[in-house]
Image (cartoon, rainbow, N blue to C red):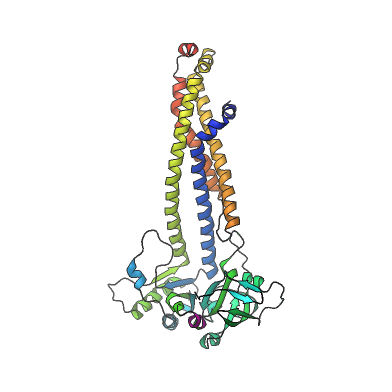
Amino acid sequence: MAIENVRAHRVSSGLTVFGVVIGVVVVVVVASILTGMRRNVVQSVEERGTHTIFAFHLTRGPRLGPGDRAEYRRKPLRPEDGEAIREQASAVLDVANEAWVWPPDRTLRYGRAKYARAILKGVSGNYPAVTTVALREGRFFSDSDDHHRRDVLVIGTDVADALFPHKASISGSEVLFVGRPFTVVGVLEKRKGQVMGGENEEDSAVFLPYRTARKISPQTSEWLLLLIRARSGQRAAALDQAEEILRRRRGLRSNQPSNFDLATSDRIIQQFDSITAAIGLVAIAISSVSLVVGGVGVMNIMLVSVTERTQEIGVRKAIGARRRDIVRQFLFEAIALTFSGGVIGVLLAVLISRILLFVLPGLPAEVPLWAVAAGLIVSVGVGLAFGVWPAKRAAALDPVEALRYE
């Protein structure tokens, strides 16, 4: 009977639950984006290795609110800092350099083919030994290539497929980059674990020697990240030793805070979780407003329904319906209204997530089952909360007066 009543008033029911639909859409879409992003972050960190410590002069990871201006005046880390850690820290196995590269023109060209979406990084020759990168063909550049600033590249599979779609062997090929030829010496193995959308940061990466990167983009030295690989079972000791060495090299007193950041994979994930929790609270606050508006609409339409169906309620009571039967009837109608809004909201959220994934393949969006369940449960809860008063009002009607009502 509740479903039939909703179907009989499709337009008014649809307008009434519009707020519920918006609230559920906001929660599910935001949850899908945050879930996909977290999966991407966890995968990226695990690809670097759980034994790796990341050293950077700025605090890593996104943060809400204005940043500390003094932090951006910190002096960057230097390759010499990594060498000192490698030589002086007994718990450290090796240290590699990684820096972001921003040349004026990021496009790689081979004949008529070109690739402009590469993630450019300048790294040291021991980068594969510290991280988990693997090669499909060719070799990684050596310390000698780095020292002599040779124009060599190691490219990801997406870059290779775009530039050399029909070429069996890519190693040794020359591509045009920043106005001069670079030799491709190796191609990375495609990552098995893919983020949603089929893309992976490493698959679209282009690695070049760190000193070569500094030659074509001098500001590269201002964004140096040290990847510190700890010996097996000694990550905590390596973290303490690296911190002590960097503090000493940067001239910090014992009472001064560190002007650099050391992070492990666990800490990076925790930082990201704290950010997603804050964003989730904002999304919940926005959706709560929509849900309250939708709930008030449901309550109003149910009160109108009680008034319009006063004689029907009187007849039901006259033939033996109890108060709880009337309450249950109107509560079911309110729940049917809001639950239908929840179902529509979930379907719209899934559709929006798929559209975002199609339009922006690099944006991870994965609809979690818990968000779908939460959206449906909340929609039912709204119906219960805002349907109680109309249901009690209907149940409290006097059957004789209700039968006389015109």
Q: Against 327, is 89 above or below?
A: below
Judging depth in this view, the residue of 300 and 82 nearest the camera is 300
| Most common SS among magenta residues | helix
In the rendered image of this protein, does residue 137 appear above or below residue 291?
A: below
Residue 114 location, x and y as percent? 62, 72
Q: Where does the magenta region start and end?
A: 212-216
The N terminus - image quarter: top right
Rendered location of residue 49, percent (x, y) = 52, 70
Residue 342 lies left or right of residue 64; in this view the side is: right
Residue sitting at 51 percent across and 66 percent down? 45
| Left or right of 229 on screen, residue 347 | right
Residue 6 in the figure: left or right of residue 172 = left
Inspect this view and state whether residue 374 appears: no
Q: Name the foreground residue: 245 vs 379.
A: 379
Residue 275, given in percent of the width and then of the height, sits at: 43, 57
Determine if the magenta segment contains residue 319.
no
Q: Is residue 153 left or right of residue 389?
A: right
| Residue 250, x across and y down, in percent | 34, 79
Query: Is 275 located above or below residue 134 in the figure?
Result: above
Residue 53 versus residue 316 in the image, above or below: below
How many marks are shown on the rendered structure? 0
Confirm whether residue 200 shows in the render: yes
Q: Residue furthest left?
A: 255
Residue sitting at x 51%, y 30%? 334
